[in-house]
Image: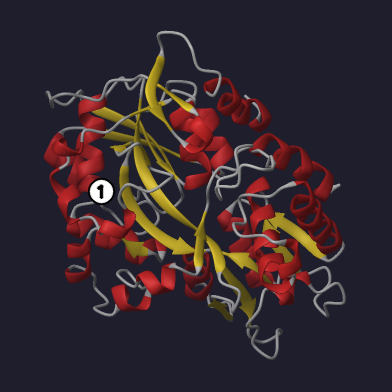
Amino acid sequence: MTAVLAAGVLTLAACGGGSDQGSGSGPGGLAVPKIDKLAALGAGEGSVNIVSWAGYVEDGTTGKTVDWVTPFEKDTGCQVNNKVAATSDEMVTLMKTGDYDVVSASGDASLRLIYGGDVAPVNTDLITNYKDIFDGLKNKQWNSVDGAAYGVPHGRGANVLMYRTDTVTPAPTSWGAVFDANSPYKGKITAYDSPIYIADAALYLMKTQPDLGIKNPYALDDKQFEASVALLKEQNKNIGEYWSDYTKEVQAFKSGNSVIGTSWQVIANLAKADKAPVESVLPSEGATGWSDTWMISSKAKHPNCGYQWMDYIVSPKANAQVAEWFGEAPSNKLACEQTTDKQHCTTFHADDESYFDQVWYWTTPLAQCVDGRTDVTCKDYSAWTQAWTTIKG
């Protein structure tokens, strides 16, 4: 399924009517398909099929010490089969096949999965570690509807600005470094290859052109959207390459083909481990970011192993391992006691809500403006997808 069709599910879900519609509603009154949550845990089915971001489901293949899958398999008897997805669009497409049990969805995928009927509400009473999840991650717009949880928070982080220290001087402090039409780094700027990157431009404009009236980078009316798209089309002239495969961005920064651009902390960590002279920063304008949620498929063939995985991966030790490897704030507050680096949670602002107040978590753009405006229609994700094609040319 194309990203445009996947996004169209939101429009279909909003139509209402029919016995498959729930009584709950989300932003703009979107109806939620009625799907029952698991009432009780049963015996594990012997395997679990997962869709995840790179670095979330490590079994020792990357490195012998990077393995939290093997202990889970030994303890539960659930064999893990993991599919790494490069983008949220790919995650949505994969989950629609019904071949996967759980997914580590970011906010730009979670609403599509919820309203598309692809994931089920989660019975948090069956997740023993749920009680220790930071309150700042529970019952958010991207992982719950009308107080019903649709997943288990995994962790969070910002989309940082990464740069080569031997090339980019002085050290950048603003996203203007990648949006400057006269950038000295023309041809060596990189950007995330996804329609959701439009929000990065909107965030920059929100801070630098307040007259546009942008209050939320995922809620853009016609004028705001056109300005964001225009900025990205101008930036495209300076882009060397767009990335979605994290390994390719690591190689691009190692070789010097890319010297500055949007990134994830895990990419900076891997590049540094490979001796690339890079650093990362949260720019003065703030950043977009992610708050990922483990969600269970409404068509899960291995729901019991799926629940066991969701509980295990947010347990203190496993959550600490993932957070340190990926470079993010863990979701379980007890994980902070389990990290090898005892300053990890401080470094990644695990319980610092003032820091995360600067981060605009990925959220699916809807026609019903997610910033609460009712006097205008905002551009939905299908419009973002169409615009992204024109931006890249």
The N terminus lies in quadrant: top right
Q: Nearer the viewer, residue 132 or 242?
A: 132
Residue that lies at the very extreme toward the top in this rendered image? 19
Residue 311: x %, y % from top left: 20, 43
Residue 65 appears in the figure: no
Q: Residue at x 13, y 44 (%)?
A: 128
Query: What amino acid is labelled 1 in the image?
Result: Ile
Where residue 369 sits, quadrant-wise, is top right
Q: Secondary structure at mark 1?
A: helix
Q: Nearer the viewer, residue 71 or 190?
A: 190
Residue that lies at the very extreme toward the bottom in this rendered image? 170
Where residue 307 sits, quadrant-wise, is top left
Q: Nearer the viewer, residue 50 or 343?
A: 343
Binning the other alpha carbons within 10 Å of mark 1 as few (below 14), some (14 to 19) or many (20 upward) gives many
Residue 2: x %, y % from top left: 66, 28
Whether residue 49 is situated above or below residue 65 in the rendered picture: above
Q: Residue at x 24, y 73 (%)?
A: 340
Residue corresponding to mark 1: 313
Residue 29 appears in the figure: yes
Residue 195: x %, y % from top left: 67, 46
Whether residue 27 is situated above or below residue 55 in the rendered picture: above
Identify the image's colour scheme: rainbow, by chain, secondary structure or one colour. Answer: secondary structure
Residue 110: x %, y % from top left: 46, 39
Q: Nearer the viewer, residue 92 or 206?
A: 206
